Image: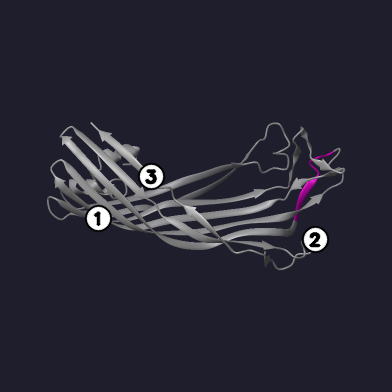
Amino acid sequence: ANGMGRTFIGVADDATSTVTNPAGLVSLTKRQVYVEYKNSSIKVNRLATVDSWLSAAHTPTEFSKNVSSISFFNVSTPINSRLAVGVTYHEFLNYKEDFQLAARTIPDISNPGSPITVGGLGFAANPVEGSASFRGTSVAGSVGYSLNPMVQVGATLSINHLTAEATATRLGINFLPGFPSPNPLAVSSNPIVKNQTKIDDSGNALGAVLGVLVKPNENVSIGFNYTKSPHFSLSENFLVNPGFANGTQQALVTSAGFPTGISINVPDHFGVGVAV
């Protein structure tokens, strides 16, 4: 299924069809067990260095993270010649990242090689220490049924769980002698926290896959599917350091209007696959 990409919708002849086109479960002649192990190298380029916004090259910094897990497990079996069922565990999302952004000089839009200044004062963006971990899993039950020798239908109903942890801590800036002129890069990070954005929440949501498989003859099969993906409602907090203006580190407090709700929606999709 992975090798064929979305075209597998039009074949769907093994147990993995529970997440692509459950109508294909009827093709099974005996019980099948599938296990998938996935190892991913997540690489993200960010403009992270002090001169990354100012220089003409805009050279990015690559942040990488290795993620590995059992991403798919399925047991499916035929009940009779017209009916088959399956149970599936599927990890549809596993994203992790750690990154550090330096204090970055903000360029003047009219003179990109120079820092923006107002009243003779130069400006820079706060340094950021960030991390993110998003993991989405589903447990699903599927059924496939043959209406006649030419048309098969199927459905999968899933319970989906999303765990989200994301933190972005913004620190203070030290403006060193020579900034902004003659040295627009004379800025550094200050360990005092200015504010912090934080997500530490989880949610559950239902999802479904509906599929149809049409086989007009033994050489051609056409598959259709529609996936109603889960929509999650989580909470995000915004914390501030009340002592930042005085140059002291104090316990972070929740800003007015927070925590606030956020939506993380996995897109719905439909597909058509043809196999000859």
Q: Amino acid at mark 3?
A: His
148 vs 127, left or right, is: left
* Secondary-structure class at tag 1: strand
Lower sequence index among marks 1 and 2: 1
Q: List x then y, in percent, for residue 112.
A: 75, 33
Please report the bounds of the magenta region as a residue range: 183-190
Residue 31 percent location from the top left of the image: 19, 53
- For the point 71% across and 31% down, which residue is it? 56
The residue at 42%/62% (across/down) is 204
Identity of the residue drawn at 56% across and 43% down: 44
| Crowd class of label 2 (few under 14; some 14 to 19; many from 20; radius 10 Å) | few
Residue type (three-letter) at the residue carrying disc 1: Gly
The residue carrying mark 3 is 269
Q: Badge 1 is on which residue?
A: 86
Cα–Cα gap, marks 2 and 3: 49 Å
Q: CA distance from mark 1 to mark 2?
A: 60 Å
Q: Quadrant of residue 261?
A: bottom right
Q: Any magenta on residue 185?
A: yes
From the top left corner, tell me how far across and down residue 136 is, in percent.
43, 55
Q: Residues within 10 Å of mark 3 (few under 14, many from 20)?
A: few
Q: Which residue is mark 2?
A: 245
| Residue 28 at least partly seen | no
65 drawn magenta: no
In the image, residue 170 above or below residue 2: below
Q: Is residue 112 above or below residue 44?
A: above
Q: Quadrant of the C terminus?
A: top left
Discs 3, 1 touching: Cβ within 8 Å: no
* Helix, strand or loop for disc 3: strand
Q: Residues within 10 Å of mark 1 (few under 14, many from 20)?
A: many
Nearest the viewer among 83 and 59 is 83
